[in-house]
Amino acid sequence: MSGLTQSIDGDIAYTSDAPGREGQERGRESFRMDLHRDGSRVITAHSEIDDPPPVVRDVSLRLDAANRPAECFVRIAVGGSFRGAGFFTFHDDGAEARALTALEGRFSQRMQSSEHPPGFGNHALVNDGYLLSLYDLSAGPGLQRIPGLLMSSPDHRGATGPMLFRVDVGIRFHGRDTVTVPAGNFDALHFSYESVAGLPVEHPAYDLWCTSDGHYVLLRGVVGGYMQTRYELARLRHRLDPAP
């Protein structure tokens, strides 16, 4: 009998919205979500950004049965060379990291907090979508603040570290929508990330549409400002375990 109740895998296409580059491919991501019988969820992703300096990222994040980050592995390469790898663990009183980076060498890091960190941003697009599950939909459309969110890098492309970095993020729920992307037609939830306090450089406007089935799979992401980029779900597959 499998230890999984469900697996979801797919691909996300990265394209440009910049004038003269509209629709041009600028990267890609393959991902998988595994739902385990103990209620935990594992989200893994391989991401590639082609724009120079190119970034390659591999991540694996486990969320516990209460939807809180438990541990995560992040490895990045920048410009075709190893930049860093780190293993993060999360607890009721904070988080720890053990990492090896080309710039900082080998180090350990700990961040104290009064409660379990609510989420972890590892810069995978599938994870950007799933972090929207932190919004309490019972409150309806509006803006909710998520204090003490941890990240693996404050860089907008996640091209530094990896190491622990704390931000306070605003998530705005705009309402329900329908979205057509290369993977098909979907009932969607429309969100945006706003007012991310703590970043050294303000992040451009970032709108996201994700599935409304409770898995928050990213369907579309649109980033304005200097980034001028778009992310769309290109393929999606669900697999159910029929075993009791």
Image: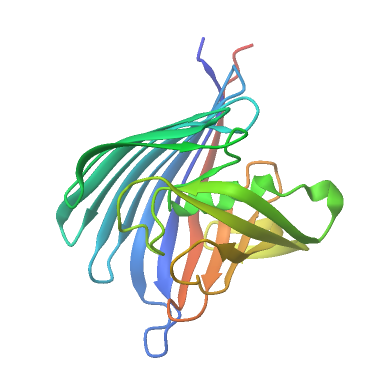
Query: Which residue does the image show at 44% across and 71% down from the upper left?
Result: 201
Q: Is residue 217 visible?
A: no
The picture quadrant where one finds residue 195 is bottom right
**188 to the left or right of 153:** right
| Residue 114 coordinates in the image, percent (x, y) | 62, 35
Seen in the picture, residue 101 relative to 115 is either above or below; the reply is below
Q: Nearer the viewer, residue 113 or 69?
A: 113
Is the residue 240 above or below the residue 162 in the image? above
- Quadrant showing the C terminus: top right
In this image, 215 relative to 33: left or right?
Answer: right
Residue 89 image offset from top left, x and y in percent: 43, 30
Q: In the displayed image of the protein, which residue is found farthest to the right?
A: 139
**Between 184 and 74, the one nearer to me in the picture:** 74
| Horizontal arrangement in the rendering, residue 26 relative to residue 237 (left or right) | left
Front residue of 42 and 116: 116
Q: Nearer the viewer, residue 208 or 202?
A: 202
Report the number of numbered marks: 0
Colouring convention used in this rendered image of the protein: rainbow
Q: Quadrant of residue 218?
A: bottom right
Q: Residue at x 85, y 47 (%)?
A: 138
Residue 53 picture location, percent across and down = 22, 68
Asked whether residue 120 is in view, the answer is yes
At 55% from the left edge and 29% from the top edge, which residue is drawn? Answer: 93
Q: Vertically, is 228 above or below 84?
A: below
Q: Position of residue 65 (x, y in %)?
A: 62, 25
For image coordinates 59% across by 17% down, the residue present is 37
